[in-house]
Image: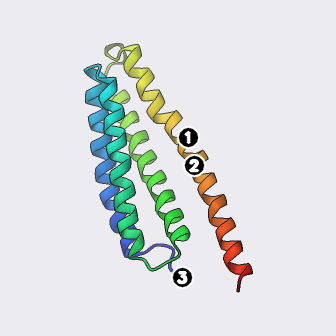
Amino acid sequence: MKIISANLILFTAIGIVLAIAFNLGTIILIRNHMQLLIWVMALIYGALLFISGRKFGSKDKLSEYYAGWRYNIAAFIFHNAVTILLFLYVFSRYDRSLIGTTQLNWWLVLVFNIPLLWGVVLIIHFLVFLAKKSKRDSNR
């Protein structure tokens, strides 16, 4: 069984573009104090990732739970990598005195809290995957 498929690579490439757009959009919204739109954009971003992961994952002809786990972990990795790299770039490039406390707080939420919450979801997803896998294996 292949761990990395062509569909997973395509999903990751599309996801990286979406993650860059999401993070750059978030920077603009934070600077313009439009916090409500950040949540709207986050919901749209999450929905687009879910839909594209579901579409590409269904083409892999794997167990739904295994494909879901692989796509979830891939999205976790590329989203957090893009977020951290952009965070480091923005804060190394601009004078920190130009960045307000509210902007810094939103960035810290994006860089630290979202991976923490997503990590909890990944653990739950993994436990569900293991439970389904052991149930399927015991039925054989």
Which quadrant holds residue 32?
top left
Label 2 neighbour load within 10 Å: few <14, some 14-19, many 20+: few
User: Along the line of sight, which residue is nearer the eye, 25 or 88?
Assistant: 25
> Which quadrant of the figure contains the N terminus?
bottom right
Mark 1 crowd level (few <14, some 14–19, many ≥20, 10 Å Cα): few
Mark 1–mark 2 CB contact (< 8 Å): yes
* 1 or 3: tag closer to the N-terminus: 3
Image spot of residue 59 (x, y percent) = 38, 76
What residue does disc 1 label? 117
In the rendered structure, the answer to whether residue 21 lies left or right of residue 91 reads left
Where disc 2 sits, the SS reads helix
Q: Quadrant of residue 8?
A: bottom left
User: Which amino acid does the dot numbered 2 rest on?
Assistant: Val
Instruction: Tell me how far mark 1 sits from mark 2, CA to CA.
Output: 6 Å
Residue under circle 2?
121
Which of label 3 and label 2 is nearer to you?
2
Residue 64, position in %: x, y? 51, 71
Amino acid carrying mark 3 in the image: Met
Residue that extends furthest to the right in the rendered view of this protein: 138
> In which quadrant will I find the C terminus?
bottom right
**Residue pictured at 35% horizontal, 59% vertical:** 51
Please state if 138 lies on the left or on the right of 70 as rendered.
right
Distance, label 1 to label 3, CA atoms, is 30 Å
Q: For the residues marked 3 and 2, what is the alpha-carbon distance in whole angstroms?
A: 25 Å
Disc 1 secondary structure class:
helix
Please give the residue where the numbered disc 3 appears in the rendered image.
1
**Who's the residue at 42% across and 75% down the image?**
5
Residue type indicated by callout 1 = Leu
